[in-house]
Amino acid sequence: MTPLLTWSQSVNITDSAGWFEVAYVKWEPVSGAESYNVYFTGEGIINQKIDNPLIRSYGTYFRADIPGLKSGTYTITVKAVVSAVEETTGTTTGSITVLAHDRNGFAFANGRVPGAYKLDGTPKAGAVILYITEETKNTVSLVVTGANANPCVGLQTILDGFKKGNDTRPLIVRLIGQITDPSYLLGGDVVIENKNNASSYITFEGVGEDDVADGWGIRVKNATNIEIRNIGTMNCNSSEGDNIGLQQNNDYIWVHNVDFFYGDAGGDADQAKGDGALDCKKSKYVTFSYNHFWDSGKSNLLGLSEGSDTELYITYHHNWYDHSDSRHPRVRYYSAHIYNNYFDGNSKYGSGSTEGSSLFVEGNYFRNSKNPMMTSMQGTDVWNNSTQQNDPNNQGIFSGEDGGTIKAFNNTFDADNATNSMRFVAYGDTNPLYNIAGKISSTSDFDAYLATTRSEVVPSSVVSKQGANTYNNFDTDVALYVKNLVPDTPEVAKAKVIQYAGRMNGGDFNWTFLPADDTSSAVNTPLKTALVNYETSLVYIQGEAVPSTHTLIVTTSNASQDVIEGEAMETIIFTWGGDATDVSVSGLPASGLSFVKNGIAKTVTITGTPTANVSYSVTTVGTISTPISESGTITVVPPGSTTGEEIHNFTLSEKVSSFYNITGNMNSTNGSVNYDGLTLTRRLKIESSTSITYTTTAISTLTLVFDDSFTGKIKLDGVDYTASAGVVTIPNIPAGAHEITKNNTANLFYIKTVYNTLGLGKNAEILKLKLYPNPVTNSFEIASIANIEQVHVYTIMGVLVKSIRNSKSVDLSNLSRGNYLVSIQTEQGTHKQIIVKR
């Protein structure tokens, strides 16, 4: 029989749109729904269901992304699932337009299509799709042909299997959410290899707007047909130091729509913002496009020791160099096509040519970009403006390397607020500023050859001042895509870059640079802080454990109490919330205690005069998320056993006491201290022979009064305690036998023991537990004289992520950055505190 299901509400879609070969939809949570099914229709596909990991909760809304679509028009239908039954009709979006990626560039030379997607944007035949999340990064598994052992478990282990190049199934690795370092990395990097097997294809991509590789880098070597896209890279601290690096022996590599944020500072002065953002060495047929560089120090190093290697072709197009400082790119040996990029407030220089490289720089928009183009050891690179002469010993930025040649065409220079010098010397420019007899000539001290037409051939008479290198005119070669390309105008390119560079819809990280940032190459401290403290707003991924959003707080912080027989207990109030719809109470009413539940205020109030010991618990109720509980014990104690105080005043009684056993010598000289309204004069010498013993029947607080000037230490039960202005207060001393002995020589006027009869909330104030350090990087310590019985660590959503017993040291190294609630159970009660994990 089919269950009869009455829907109280339908899915309310709040947003839907298309992007490059992906569409997405957002909707409000449906009350009672435990999951959702999402289907898409369009371009020959009808009601195809998407994979669970593509559906995510962000608390106030859900979102599903559908990558791998060809350009065209689609609709998306969302259906809620309640009690394992899918809604009949669901809710469908209007028409969604999906765009095609811009696949211009050398990565697509010779008929190659990098990555595991076809030219139309859909997965290649037989493609394997892996979903990597913070939860699955170390447990995802796949049987890989030729791997050392199968199944391969963990992201890097799977990639190690593909390293051998024997498994030629197209591989799509989809990253979801904020992913911190997997347990197995290679020098802090995820390394992608496939032994240059031309039949192997790998795409490494983020899903949606908020995928982040947090703390680790991506390294590509000995690889071909690789695509990396739609990822945010930040806080990289790998040994190589690059957010993404093409290291060696690669070809047909496409990196696009990536956000490059600060990495951790390196050891060199020029690595304050991290090392390279996107570097390329010993790789051929490469395209870097539509990437967003956020104040990077060194954006794009290109080339190392390639020398006369052939086919060193690379394309940089539609990248946003957003207040980044230098290397846009800095080129050795390569033939680089640099077009339609937006150079936005760059404090050091734009593109640089060295070691015989040939750069075709066209259709770019330079806004306040200092020194837009430079060639090593000539022109602007060595010009000293203050002395008005070349100064190659002090001015050269390219380590004295031989020059290359830049061909420039149709670039826009926009010094909109004149904050940056945008010096540019064109070959043969007759401007007298660039032609000073005996000093400089624009036919030798030029930055670039300024072409009058796009197809103009740079003559062989144009040579670099150092190295006599010439331009190779690769851009006019009919066999290469460059010759027939129709680039955007600089103004259109700028608008397109602002709209499309970086992750989908600009990603989930927003920042506004100030005019002063145009000229500064220093670390932007507020930006750095924001990146270090970045935390995803993703709550959970469908198919993974749903974190509890039930909340239950002992508002009065006194769930457990010692109550004197015949007296009323302190009122206890529990407050619930989140997805919890109610609470249940067990163990009450009993022995003179009762409770009142208020469903509107969402509180439980416990009151009464206990006649016996009572243990109780309060547990949240709700169909969504995991219930949580809080427990307490009300203990009845006889009158006099845990009340009152035991005072010894040496001025009045010297060493005679019925409570304290005092061994030692009185000081023959009086002192004078005022304490608690008393004038104290007689004092006991605290020396090696001194001993004060006593026995308590319950938890107590000890106060010792010394000379006002005493700031030394005294021992209780062998533990040192430091005086402040002559007073030592030691809280929460367990019941039992105790001894006071010397650490530093002192004079003691007064002793007071007070039994703790307060509820837990007040006990917590006396406890003064300290968690340090806070924020915490790897582990924190608990400073307390009380014994630590148990420590629980919860996410802010209430999910238990760590539990340990009998330890004052807590390791959080395996947890993600963010805020956590720490609950510490001692023999005196429970202490709760928020701690920040960096």
Image (cartoon, rainbow, N blue to C red):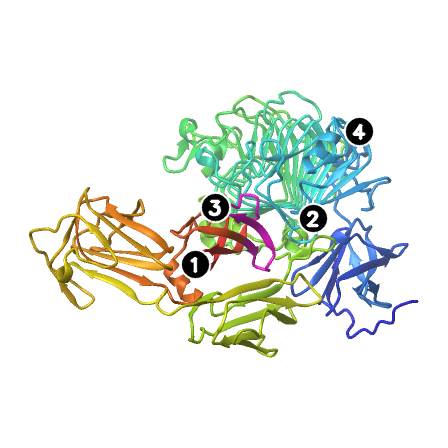
Q: Distance between the residues labelled 4 and 3?
A: 55 Å
Residue toward you, 368 or 790: 790
Labels 2 and 3 touching (C-beta < 8 A): no
Q: Label 4: few (<14), some or many (≥20) within 10 Å?
A: some
Q: What residue is disc 4 on?
A: 198
| Mark 4 residue element | loop
Residue toward you, 143 or 70: 143
Quadrant containing the N terminus is bottom right
> Closer to the observer: label 2 or label 1?
1
> Closer to the observer: label 2 or label 4?
4
Q: Distance between the residues labelled 2 and 1?
A: 72 Å
Residue toward you, 523 or 451: 523
- Mark found first going from the N terminus, 2 or 4: 4
Q: Distance between the residues labelled 2 and 4?
A: 32 Å
- Mark found first going from the N terminus, 2 or 1: 2
Q: Please name the residue shown 47% across and 54% down the image.
A: 515
Identify the image quadrant of residue 125. top right
- Mark found first going from the N terminus, 4 or 3: 4
Q: Can residue 714 be seen in this view?
A: no
Identify the image quadrant of residue 761. bottom left
Q: Label 2: few (<14), some or many (≥20) within 10 Å?
A: some
Q: In this view, does 340 lie above or below 390?
A: below
Residue type marked 2? Asp
Q: What residue is disc 3 on?
A: 807
Residue type marked 4? Ala
Examine the structure image and report whether residue 583 is included in the region drawn in magenta: no
Q: Label 3: few (<14), some or many (≥20) within 10 Å?
A: few
Q: What residue is disc 2 on?
A: 488
